[in-house]
Amino acid sequence: MNQREAMMKQFRDSFTSSGYPVICETVKKETLFLPCEDGVELFTEIFTPDPKEIAPPYSTVVQRSCYPHMQEMLCITGEEMAKRGFAFVYQFCRGTGPSKGVWEPNVNDRADGLCLMRYLDGLDIIKNIGYRGASYLAFTGWVMADAVPKKVKSFYLTVYGTDRHTSAYQDGLFRQDILTAWAMDNAGFPISADYMESAKYRPQIEVDEALWGRKLPWYRDWISNTDRTSPYWNQGFWKMLREIPSKMKIPVFVGEGWYDHHLGSALKGFSSLSKESAAHAVLNVGPWNHSSKSVIEKQKALGLALHSEENETKSVLDWFTLTLKEEKLPERKVRFYLIGADTFLEFSDYPVPFDEEKVLYLGENETLLDTPGVSGKQSYRYDPNDPVPSYGAESLFRTMSAVGSLRQPDVHYRSDVLSFRSLPFKEDTDIIGPIKASLYVSSDAPDTAFTFKIMEEFPDGEAYHIRSGITTLAYRNGSPERLSYTPNTVEPITVQSWDVAWRIQKGSRIRVDISSSNFPEYAVHPNKEGVWSTIKETAVANQTIYFGPDTPSAILLPTVHLKKE
């Protein structure tokens, strides 16, 4: 059995282990090319139970995909869902798989998806409809979620967010390992260029014609609109997508992973749901990557991750049994996995309020202190041509082996990475929410980047990634538009991570690394002013971090006091 055969067997077995028995032995399949409003025909397959065994109408689950390699998995889904009394429909997006038309990411999926939903809404054999999707398949659900016909009763959407700027940028730096890689894989024509060479190419705005062989206008749009206030993100399609959660009316299950690259955007989407939808929405976040695999190395080794894996197939069947077959409205729920405690916590709302913000101040001798120590500073030299490699990260896709809570190199592993360590914690400490680095910095460059990475250093000396963050002087302190900076002046900046739920073990230390690059999770900052993708030349920058009473650089941990059993 090869790797793909094993993967398909494992996927089929997830239905067997879900606890939902087979209630229909025979499955019927219908294949058709469904015409869209403009006449383009899209490949569509409908799986139903044999009506001799289970009479219609059927509760129906729908998926739309742009990935032809998923066809076998979609067919397995159709067969197994039909055996459990559901109808299942999948369709390939235009220009992908056997579907007709020209592939262009995103723009046609609202109209095409609604055309499919209206067709299904009119079929007598269909009782009601739910939509299921992960990643781009979740996008094809979100993009029509505010306008679906009346038979559509719920959505189950995982590892995708509707705020595209958040998915693409952090303070002016592009998430290359997601979107540069995705553009190369989904350009609509084969690209043989090396990914890393492509990600490093300068100016990036020309990489398509220089290395890929053809101009890719939509990729150029992504990499040239760095401002959150840009009309590109705030008019037309992307504005519509961002606002859809606030306009939808039906229940939605939002599934995410602490180490999935869509987490930040997905949490924003959940927070912006309309009152009607939010009242029956579920948010479920586990210690998973984009493939829903647990990626907390140390906790697994210590036996603190026994419950970190879930049968997603069972969760899907639970959701659609409740919302379609039983026609019930779900109870609102926010469910987070607390890494290190090996438990899921349940809340009624999000964001989760923290009880106090524990502050650890950067100090001399590479320490983290409870109060500001003596004044001091540390400096390093940042060369964009030798960036710090991403290893242990939240926002990776192509470099999937480097995503997650992975063991970090020892202190002083690079001269351009500063490390600070706390004393051992005297008790277990629970963090829920975004971690912040409040830093006082200067640079001799007119613009540059600063990063932080926070780790738990266990009593055996091994340090494991918790969270990281990055900012630039041009977009410092959350500015949605570019700011100016005078070289060699001290500026207070805040670098914020995405949310996390993490228990720091009694006896462990916190370690924080500060640097200026994290590649390919983010584009390398060239230490020049301007839009990153248009800059060809780079410069070396001399960076300084200040600490002490007048410049109290610190790490801020949102701690929650949980009741101990």
Image: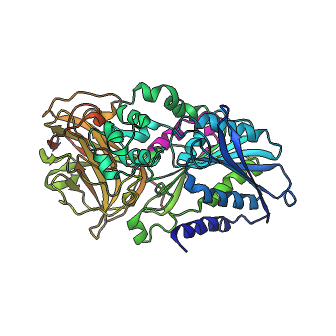
Per the rendered image, the range of residues in magenta is 264-281
Q: Image quadrant of residue 116?
A: top right
- Left or right: 411 as drawn, with respect to 506: left
Q: Image quadrant of residue 128?
A: top right
Viewer-nearest residue: 470 or 203? 203
Query: Is 277 a magenta residue?
Result: yes
Toward the front, the furthest residue is 213
- Left or right: 210 as drawn, with respect to 83: left
Residue 272 in the image: x percent, y percent?
Answer: 53, 35
Residue 3 in the image: x percent, y percent?
Answer: 51, 69
Question: Image point 42% across, 38% down: which residue?
Answer: 166
Question: Image point 59% across, 65% down: which residue?
Answer: 8
Q: Quadrant of the N terminus?
A: bottom right
Question: Image point 29% across, 40% down: which residue?
Answer: 471
- Left or right: 267 as drawn, with respect to 465: right
**In the image, is residue 79 above or below residue 227?**
below
Tell me, what colour scheme is on the image? rainbow
